[in-house]
Amino acid sequence: MRIFHCERCRHIVPFTALRCPTCDSSLGYVSEDRTIRVLHDTAAPAVYRIDGRRQRVWRCLNSAWGCNWLVPAASDIEWCRSCRLTRGRPDEGRPVAIEAWMVAEAAKRRLLYQLDELSLPVEIRSESAPDGLVFDLVHLPGEGGITGHLDGIVTLVLAETYDRHRDELRRRLGEPFRTVIGHLRHEIGHHYWGRLVGQTDEMNSFRQLFGDERTDYGVAVERYYAGATPAWDHTRFVTAYAASHPLEDWAETFAHYLHIVDATDTAVAYDLVHTDRANHVVGDASPRARFDAMIDAWRPINAAVNAIAESLGAPAVYPFDPTGAVIDKLAFVHEQIAGHTGRERFYASH
């Protein structure tokens, strides 16, 4: 992710900032411009103006819970486009649930920022857009729950925001890496499979790389969790779970593609990538970049970050080294994202 600055004092501000930590200016995120702007009071309560923009704005109704995204004041919309994607929120009388929901929403806003950078359309599920997207962020204290995707509905069990719970599951399942943003990137990958592959002429290419998605999904996943899946071949699958079924292989590969792009974007923002290469592999340019250029820019950064973590006694930040067929699969994801704008349709309702 790029670095954001306060317009007033020019100091760095977080993507999540409601106020500048240096000069205390009121800040808000304008999603259509992908920028953080200083908000100026107006005569109308809770209505703000932004320099250079005629349109007045107000804060998303969820600003009290950490959302810094803005909404046009002239509309009757109360929630920003990120918050409108979520169906409901926990009861305010359950502070633990609210705290978990806030963590998940922050990760979802980062995900949407990246999807916007990649020009991947996000259509809110509705009667007019039945193949659109919606999130259920579910808090089930003391109960089991399933994080997953079904027909455009991304479900995240909020226990995944708890470090202890997430680490216990990571150890039990033998995973080297488990994060909230990783879950969201994986499940959104399932959603985009139908948009980028399932309704296109890329099915044969997909099956040659990933396998036949018509293989019984339930049986395949049950076999994986029963421990009947062969040993993980790092040269063929980005993770062990990717080997369970072609659709999981796609979703895992899609998620790791987003990891790599975002990490590279952040490295460029902090001047850790040579300028000759930087402008060609990040932000709006990334869908047009050659994937080999992107992966070449990312590898030394990832190696350095993991080495720094080791020097501090911490586990590797990103303990993966894609190779072999995994690179081909990542490149396929890249090609589908880069090529989607040339297709006749994306959502069936359009």
Image (tube, rainbow, N blue to C red):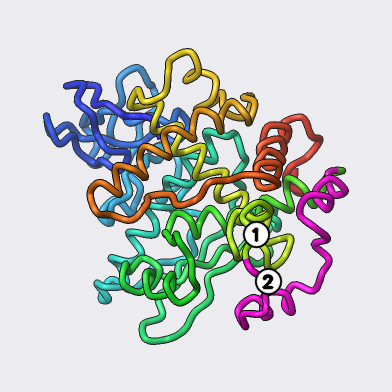
Quadrant in which the N terminus appears: top left
Q: Is 264 positioned to the left or the right of 27 in the image?
A: right
Quick check: 14 above or below 157?
Answer: above
Quick check: 322 above or below 337?
Answer: below
| Residue at image location 19% in from the left, 38% down from the top | 19
Q: Is 244 positioned to the left or the right of 255 in the image?
A: right
Q: Name the residue under label 1.
A: 233
Number of residues whose C-alpha sits closer than 10 Å to that of mark 2, classed few (under 14), some (14–19) or many (20 or more): few
* Residue 204 is inside the magenta segment: yes
Q: Residue 340: where, in percent of width, then height?
A: 72, 35
Q: Residue 263: where, in percent of width, then height?
A: 44, 38
Along the line of sight, which residue is nearer the eye, 162 or 305? 305
Does the residue at mark 2 contact the one at mark 1 (Cβ under 8 Å)?
A: yes
Along the line of sight, which residue is nearer the eye, 152 or 222? 222
From which residue to which does the magenta span run? 202-231
Q: Is 101 positioned to the left or the right of 26 in the image?
A: right
